Amino acid sequence: SNHNTIISISSNNNNNNKKNKPTTASTNRGFGLPPPTFQEVLAGFKTRLPPNAASQPCPCCSNSNSGSTSTTYGDCCQPYHLGEQQCESPRSVLKSRYTAFCFRNIGHIIATTNPQCRDYQQDKIAWAKDLDKTGMFDSFEFVELNILDKEQQDSTDDDNTAYIK
C-alpha cells in the first residue's frame, strides 16, 4: 500500500520578519532507505576469491598429509563458505576458517567465531566493517595449514586442540 506521511514543522525564529508558516513535507518512503543488511554489507567488501576458485586446489591443503592437494575448493571448503554445509568437527572449522582468511571471506569468519571468543561482537555489521577496515590480514601471506596427526600431538592435549604452524 502507498502511504503518504505528512510532517509539519513550525519555527519561532524571531530574526525572521515573515509570518511563521508551518512547513509541510510529504513522502511515501519514510525517513530514507532502510539500513543495509549483513549480506549487503558483506557484498560490498573486496575478497581474494579467484574467479575460478571452485576448480582450484583448496588453500587448506586438505590432503596435504597424503602429499596430494587435488581436492578442489568446490569440493572442500566452498560448501561451508556458502552455508550449504555446517562444519562437523574442529578440524573442518579450522580448515574452513583458514581458507576464509586466505580468500578474505569475512562472513564465514564471523559465522564461525564462538560467542565466548574475545573477538566476538554482537553487532555483526559493525564487526564486519571493522574487519574490512583493519585489512582482514591483508599484509599476511597464507602459505600452508599444517594440521598435526593425533600421534604428533602432545599426550596432554585433548581432542579439541588444534595447532597452527
Image (cartoon, rainbow, N blue to C red):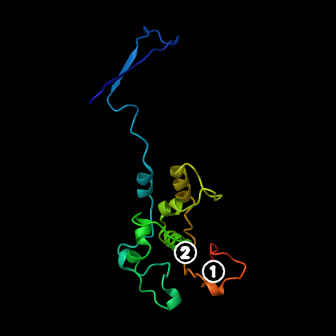
Image coordinates of residue 147 in percent, x first then y, are 58, 81
The quadrant holding residue 55 is bottom left
> In the picture shown, does residue 14 fall above or below 75?
above
- Nearer to me, 43 or 22: 43
Q: Residues within 10 Å of mark 1 (few under 14, many from 20)?
A: few
Q: Which residue is mark 2?
A: 91
Quadrant of the rendering where the N terminus is positioned: top left
Q: Which residue is mark 1?
A: 165
User: Above or below — where is 13 with respect to 53?
Assistant: above
Q: Is residue 84 rendered to the left or right of residue 148?
A: left
First-in-chain label (2 vs 1): 2
Residue at image coords 57%, 67%: 137
Q: Nearer the viewer, residue 44 or 107?
A: 107
Residue displayed at 53% across by 59% down = 110
Question: Please, what is the three-letter code of the amino acid marked with disc 1?
Answer: Lys
Q: Element at badge 1?
A: loop
Residue at coordinates 51% horizontally, 59% vertically from top-left? 111
Give the farthest residue toward the right: 156
Percent position of residue 97, x then y: 52, 69
Return the residue nearer the eye: 101 or 10: 101
Secondary element type, mark 2: helix
